[in-house]
Image (tube, rainbow, N blue to C red):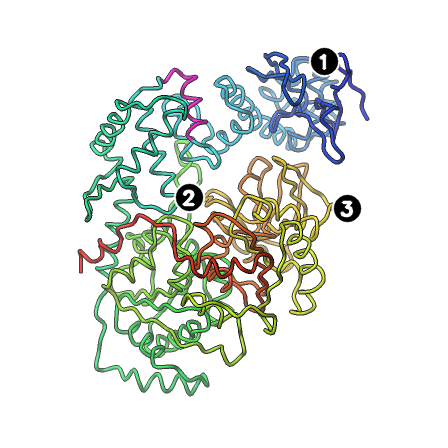
Amino acid sequence: MKMYNIIYINQDKTTEIKVKNGVPYIVFKNLELPGIVHGFSTRLGGVSEGIYISAEGEYVNHPQYDLQFKFNSYEIKMPDDMISIERYLGSGIIKGVGEALAKRIVKKFKMDSLRIIEEEPERLAEVKGISERKARDIAVSYNEKKEMQDAIIFLTGYGISINLAVKIFNEYGQEMYKIIRSNPYKIAEDINGVGFKTADEIAERMGISSDSDFRIRAALLYTLLNASQLGHMYLPKQMLVAKTYSLLVADNVPYNEELEDEIGSQIIELQMTGKAIVKELAGDVTAVYAAANYYIELNSARILSDIDLDFTSEDRPLDKMLAQIEEAEKITLEEKQKLAIKNAVNNGVAVITGGPGTGKTTTINAMIKMFEKLNLELLLAAPTGRAAKRITEATGYTAQTIHRLLELSGGGIDEEGNRSAYTFVRNSNNPLEADVIIIDEMSMVDSSLFYSLLQAIMPGTRLVLVGDSNQLPSVGPGNVLKDIIRSGVFSVTVLDKIFRQGENSDIITNAHLINAGKQLEINNKSRDFFYIPRQGSQDIIAELKHLILDSLPGFFQVDPMNIQVLTPMRKYELGVENLNKRLQEILNPSSRSIPEKEKNDVVFRKGDKVMQIKNNYKLEWKIMDAKDRFVKEEGVGVFNGDVGFIKEIDEFDQKIVVEYDDGRLVDYLYSQLDELEHAYAITIHKSQGSEYPVVVIPLLTGPAKLLNRNLLYTAVTRARKGVVIVGNIGLVKTMIDNIDEQKRYTTFAERLAELA
């Protein structure tokens, strides 16, 4: 271990400096427990070795932890001596420069080393081992890092943490200076994990008054944005005012009626500037929309109405053609399946809905054959890569994600040096070239994506929407499938005959019982649906380990990695955050031979099962040929809910490579790892549109609003071969009886009805 001076800050000598992976950090020895080290790194999540932090603060006596150093402020300083310059260059932050080369650079140019790299990079070729090309590469890498360092120094001056500064720079680049100075609240809208409070603190340091109209409007817009993230297209005015007020005022501050009135006044101001739309709804409800959400609903309703043409023709012997398809495919279609296919042929917009085992896939297959007989060109798509892959395997017809169907593009640098916006190539000016478009797993499609799809569809193209309306709504805003059905405007066929009962599938049988509000028979006589009573969270976790490693792989002939744990919650002992730590230990334990990277107390390890947790239209991906020789396909965009495995951890380039289910390879810089989380366990909500061989559902307790019939139904219907419920079996009855669902504030159905 490289030696550092030990600094003691109390008489008991309980505080010292240690080193891990070449990085010194302060340790409070009296806080250490077996397997736990307390300290903070001088790297501070983005500052490299050789860069100094000048901190101001004071020592305070903590009632629990004794003597502590409390930071009031800190400033990042670039290296200003030869040893620090050498450590900085050799830290791995600059591609192509290791410790040995850093020594040679500093030996040659001494204190002038950083200036040479920045201003005269060609001179680096004077150093042994550096070619002219490598000199240019070093200069490019250095300047990229220096831009970030300059940004960090600028942002920390406003009290912004280094981790957040890195996020801000990665999001905006050089545009961040203008954004921070003009509207610091924008970072709460654009950057994952940044709330209004953080942006508010930055604004305060910039001198924005706590009672300024600008602050109130920012709080209103943030509240509407947050409502969208919870699935709402609008908020009732009274609710919006109350939520905004709670953002602006601390809990212990006396009620301020004037502020509440001012919030109401600023809603009018937002309406006048076109940032919000206020509408009176039935039942004396005043609805306040973010302007974008209002026009998404309005324009989506108009387009959907426009494309719903009548294609009925007496010249087409549909019954005869269906009989031919049945004979050729050796299938027998139920009457409602035939009706669904006829409706899809005869209408511009047709909806097919039904639960598991009701023949939706068979109907899609026969429908594809019908459209082929009619010489109609069709496209097949689904919201996620996993759902698209599944429908491709089921039909033999190539499906793709809606984002790829619409050809997501952008993010390049324009002639003026600005990064272009991310858009869909397919739009009203460049519509999709197809006679029929079929969208599967429609319950997952949110309002924004649906609007983008509709913009690329011209009248004359049939749109067929297939999904289970009893599933949970989309993760994004809106309740599109249910609203279309609820409007009563379009052709809707409900498939309700269960075909898979003949296979003795209790998964299918129980799913329909749950949906009907009927209680399940609690026994273990089934071949694919099991109950294991356990009383406490630790007992449940121990049972999960036994099931995943020992029991289920052999019984169902499935790889342990393909056994999916689904839980209602994120927090608590049986939430995804804790379960993923425990399941990682079971399925992909630490080993000296397996590379890993720790970020924000989360350890990412090669081989880990991970999920993207936000839509990122900027992330680039590529698909290699079968032998990894050349790039077969490339594009941009990775989306909330995409699941893959960590293929590589590259310490030199400071990145993790994830391979997703559809073969896409995506590079994540270490600073982007907050967009990933482990996926050994996922929330039931995130499982929509996916199927797994075996699903294990741990149940003990949780918020009543989560433990409802809809959630249980969704979890059960994700499994193909087996369902195992572990824990409080009585909770199954509670969930079936609980029909309360979180209300989504939408008016799409009403908009459609108005245009009918």
Numbered disc in front, either 3 or 1 = 1
In the picture, measured across the screen, residue 637 lies left or right of residue 375, that is right
Q: Could you give the CA–CA distance between mark 3 and mark 1, rounded to whole angstroms?
A: 38 Å
The residue under label 3 is 593
- Measured as percent of width and height from the top left, residue 411 is found at 44, 41
- Decide which of tag 3 and tag 1 comes sooner along the chain: 1
Rendered position, 690 above or below 655: below
- Helix, strand or loop at mark 1: loop
Q: Residue at x 59, y 67 (%)?
A: 530
Quarter assignment of residue 2:
top right
In the picture, measured across the screen, residue 225 lies left or right of residue 545, that is left
What stretch of residues is rendered in magenta? 196-208
- Measured as percent of width and height from the top left, residue 183 is found at 37, 25
User: Which is nearer the eye, 651 or 355?
Assistant: 355
The residue under label 2 is 410
Q: Amino acid at mark 1?
A: Ile
